[in-house]
Image (tube, rainbow, N blue to C red):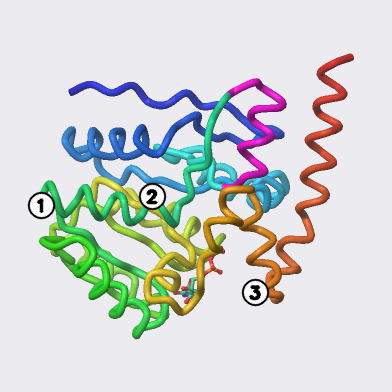
Amino acid sequence: MTINKPLRTDVLGIPVDCVTMNGAIDYATYLIEENKKGCYILAINPEKVMVLSKDEVLLKAFSSAALLIPDGIGVVMALRWLHGVAVSRVPGAELMPRLCKMAAEKGYGVFLYGAQEEVNQGSAEKLCQMYPGLKIAGRANGYHKEEDMPELARQINASGAKILFVALGSPKQEQWIQKWSDKLNVNIIQGIGGTLDTIVGKVKRAPSFFCKFGLEWFYRLVTEPQRVKRQKVLPVFAWKVIKEKVKSKK
Ligand code: UDP
């Protein structure tokens, strides 16, 4: 099977791939079947576009990703408006369970790294209930010291996992992935932020109404007000997109 790499475009100079949910699963499956090592999948949303526009080192880590999924509605709308590209959201929190489903069907082991111990353990159990036959090749909570990292990498490699999920939040997980991806034997690494917290129900994902109308960010702002500091960049993002559009019309 040969699958072309999804087309990479950009939003305000930050790379993002024109890919659907099924396209992302197919591409990840292809990378595993071809036994490509350390290919990583990261999510792009307006917050990250703003952070990356000021952080060259982090931008380099993102640019080397195998797949940059359009995770946030703001990115999807900007892609449509600025480039006329008709993409839909590929939320990282939805891609992760879809990859687990694929792994269960194909017999690929997965490794869960990140979140608090009870969240990590609880999500491993929940995923096995959701996808019978899923092999959790290994798991580790996200509160290990820096000096434990070589041992963790050894455990991940010894587990034989083909997919590694890293749930340390952003930008910690992307920095970790950049540092360790070329030392790991796994084929796919996905940075999944707080997804394990939503799997165990510690953090609720927005009801479908909010997702349908592109208001998941608003739901999170109301239910997790501590995120206001991160989300205050959203109006700046919208303003920059408008400026870019006006500039392109001149
Ligand atoms: N986390 C972790 N180790 C750390 C810091 C954070 O494992 O040193 C975990 C935390 O327990 C939570 C996730 O990372 O499960 C962060 O979730 P958040 O929703 O903030 O992710 P983001 O919005 O950045 O994707």
Q: Which residue is mark 1?
A: 107
- The structure residue drawn at horizontal position 87% and vertical position 24%, both measured from the top left corner, is 246
Q: Secondary structure at mark 1?
A: loop
Q: Is residue 166 above or below residue 19?
A: below
- Under mark 2, the amino acid is Leu
- The structure residue drawn at horizontal position 66% and vertical position 54%, both measured from the top left corner, is 215
Magenta-drawn segment: 72-85
- N-terminal of the pair, mark 1 or mark 3, is 1
Question: Which residue is more in the foreground, 147 or 46?
Answer: 46
Query: Majority secondary structure of the magenta segment?
Result: helix
- The structure residue drawn at horizontal position 67% and vertical position 48%, both measured from the top left corner, is 46
Residue 177 appears left or right of 120: right
Question: Which residue is more in the foreground, 195 or 8?
Answer: 195
* Badge nearest the viewer, 1 or 3: 3
- Under mark 3, the amino acid is Thr
Q: Which residue is mark 2?
A: 95
Percent x, y of residue 113: 33, 68
Q: Is residue 38 above or below residue 229?
A: above
Q: Which residue is mark 3?
A: 223
- Under mark 1, the amino acid is Gly
The quarter holding residue 171 reads bottom right
